[in-house]
Image: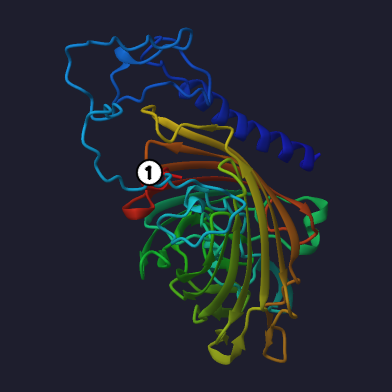
Amino acid sequence: MPHFRNYFVAMLTTLAVGLPTVAFAQRPCPPCRNYCPPRWNCPPSHQDNWKAAPSHDEPAPAPEIDDNAPPSPDAPPSPDAPQQPQTPQQAPPSFNPSTPQASTAATSPQATAPGMIGDFFGTGGSYSIIGGSPFQGPNPASAGGNVGRQKTAENTSPIPRDRVFLNYSLFHDTALNENPAAIGGGRDGAMVNRFTPGFEKTFHNGDMSFEMRMPFAATIDNTYNASGINDTGDFQWGDLTIFLKSLLYNTNTVAYSAGLGFSFPTSDGFEATVGADTVSVDSNAIHALPFMAALYTPNDQFYAQTYLQFDFDLNGNDVVINGVSSGRINDAAAMFFSVGAGYWIYQDLYGGGRIRGIAPTAELHWNRNLGSTDYVTDGGANTVGNADSVDLIDVVLGVNVLVGDSSIVTAGYGFPMISNDHQFEGEFRLSLNYLFGPQSRQTVSQF
């Protein structure tokens, strides 16, 4: 039943955003004053003189000829007129998707493709032993604390862009306060509302970019005791995350990029008290996030993209048990593979309407650990960080709406498809992007 519910919510989210937007996107054409369906190419644009333009139903009248009017510059010369040397005319450039052509990020048609929506929470559960008793809580070795970690394929395009953005994620029924082994039997985990503002700025002629994200969330308190969680709506900062991206190869149909990211420990640590025993885990770990990405646009409507990213804990988190330093706990190395595709069912890049494009999209995300999880023990009644290995597949369905020349609104719903290790039962995502500079839609629409 949970899978049928998730499919229903995902489709409802897509339709609730897409259908009203399609209706709103229909705009009156100036010459005929009728509401045109999507993708109707109205003869004039809003800058043209619509009175002189032909209507949809009748051809434009033939121009009248005045014998006394001076000759037009475009008229053929008379036989008696002196001959002037003529320069050869060049055909205007045309776009042929099957012909590879070198271009920059600022002028490539791939710049019109929306970014990946994303799926990840990144903080699963663990089954520690504190004071000799089993303790169900979050994985203290995971990056981002109770806010969750960031990965590259979260509202990002393989193409470098100038933009500011805000990502919102509502994670339902997370594994922060539950035993991962009990997920198959159902649970009532905590709900997390996460916000991620950030920006991306290009340099080196638009072929490279620097991106920064600073997530925060209303999530569970990072301090626990034997009676359970003290607060399920605590405000916490996540890990500050940056990415450097470089466009390696770009034609009119294919683009490849690669880069390196880092997350820095700005999130809160972990502390649990059971009886007379207290365990605390500081937030110290810096994570390296190398990635590769590709984008494929065979025409001006279909697009597909893929990401491959790794996550390496460089130094781990310090563990203190009953006031005594007991070592460091390291997060397991991880691999994230994402693939997604979408289709512009409506485009009006040249028109004057508010809605310029609508593109439903579907994504598949595979997240897994590459090594065993770590733990620290004092040799007695306390063992910290005994988390299960993560190997999960998430599905995301959504819709992208291009508003005006440079704003993109994205809504989607994600859910785990195949896994006993999933970190949430369902997730709603909403992303707002404002593009500026050479990557604005008004610039790239020349293709």
Q: Nearer the viewer, residue 271 or 432?
A: 432
Position of residue 292 relative to residue 415, above or below, is below
Position of residue 219 relative to residue 272, above or below, is above
Q: Nearer the viewer, residue 198 or 83?
A: 83
Assign the N terminus to one quadrant of the image: top right
Q: Nearer the viewer, residue 442 or 328?
A: 442
Q: Nearer the viewer, residue 389 or 404?
A: 404
Left or right of 64: which side holds 105? right
Q: Amino acid at mark 1?
A: Ser
Few, some or many C-alpha atoms within 10 Å of disc 1 (few <14, some 14-19, many ≥20)? some
Left or right of 325: which side holds 63? left
The outermost residue toward the front is 80
Note whether residue 105 is visible. Answer: yes
Residue 21 locus on image (x, y percent): 50, 27
Mark 1 element type: loop
- What residue is shown with label 1? 406
Residue 288 locus on image (x, y percent): 54, 79
Picture quadrant of residue 29: top left
Residue at coordinates 66% horizontally, 59% vertically from top-left?
338
Residue at coordinates 46% horizontally, 45% vertically from top-left?
447
Residue 169 locus on image (x, y percent): 53, 49
Position of residue 209 relative to residue 191, above or below, is below
